[in-house]
């Protein structure tokens, strides 16, 4: 490749990288260790009902969004956005979608649907906890994940 072409390619790459980094402004690329899970133990085989509990290491009052086997809402979005537009949000409707909003440090899961794509007799489920403001809006990128296993077809 001629030197001029290499120089243009390098310049184009540098511009693309700079523009790409600029699109990431506001993101926090550090681990947030404020929350630690208490139950269930990581990768533990458990049975329903299962209580997911955690502890915040910094004092204060918090609101949490808890998502089972799905991605959490994006920063700035409201937890009610997981429901069909126009639906009056209730804790029961959110729970039907495996989404919970709480100001407590725990949630008890009574139903966790089988993962249809997973035919194994022991299924791995994900719990994702995020911080919400008092109105149910996600306030930052911090998210904490715990995995636990349930037998397929758990009642």
Image: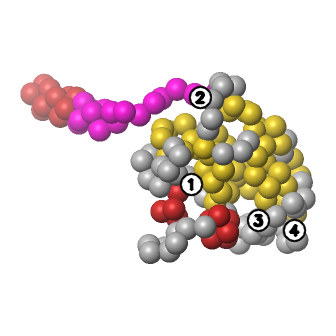
Give the percent coordinates (x, y) of residue 38.
Answer: 81, 37
Which numbered disc flags the more N-terminal residue, 4 or 3? Answer: 3
Answer whether labels 3 and 2 touch (C-beta < 8 Å): no
- Magenta region, residue range: 16-34
Asked if the residues shown at circle 4 and circle 3 are in contact, with their CB atoms under 8 angstroms apart, the answer is yes
Image coords of residue 39 (percent x, y): 83, 42
If you read the primary sequence from the N terminus, does the residue marked by circle 3 or circle 2 appear first? 2
Q: Quadrant of the C terminus?
A: bottom right
Q: Secondary structure at mark 1?
A: loop
- Does residue 144 sit above or below 117 in this rendering? above
Measured as percent of width and height from the top left, residue 104 is found at 71, 45
Give SS at disc 2: loop
Q: Which residue is mark 2?
A: 32
Given residues 52 and 15, the one toward you in this image is: 52
- Is 28 on the left-hand or right-hand side of 41? left
Please report contact status of discs 1 and 3: CB closer than 8 Å, yes or no.
no
Q: Nearer the viewer, residue 136 or 73?
A: 136
Residue 43 in view of the camera? no
Residue position marked by numbered label 1 in the rendering: 71
Mark 3 highlights which residue? 112
Inspect the magenta stretch and tell me whether residue 86 lies in it.
no
Q: Which residue is mark 4?
A: 154
């Amino acid at each position: 490749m001629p030197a001029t072409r290499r120089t243009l390619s390098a310049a184009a790459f540098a511009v693309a990288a700079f523009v790409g980094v600029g699109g990431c402004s506001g993101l926090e690329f550090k681990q947030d260790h404020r929350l630690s899970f208490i139950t269930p133990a990581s990768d533990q085989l458990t049975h329903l009902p299962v209580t997911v509990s955690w502890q915040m290491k910094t004092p204060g009052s918090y609101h949490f969004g808890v998502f089972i086997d799905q991605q959490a809402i994006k920063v700035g979005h409201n937890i009610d956005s997981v429901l069909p537009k126009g639906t009056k949000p209730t804790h029961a409707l959110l729970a039907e979608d495996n989404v919970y909003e709480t100001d407590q440090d725990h949630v008890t899961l009574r139903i966790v649907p089988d993962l249809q794509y997973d035919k194994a007799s022991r299924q791995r489920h994900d719990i994702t906890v995020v911080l919400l403001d008092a109105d149910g809006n996600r306030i930052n990128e911090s998210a904490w994940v715990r995995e636990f296993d349930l037998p397929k077809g758990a009642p």
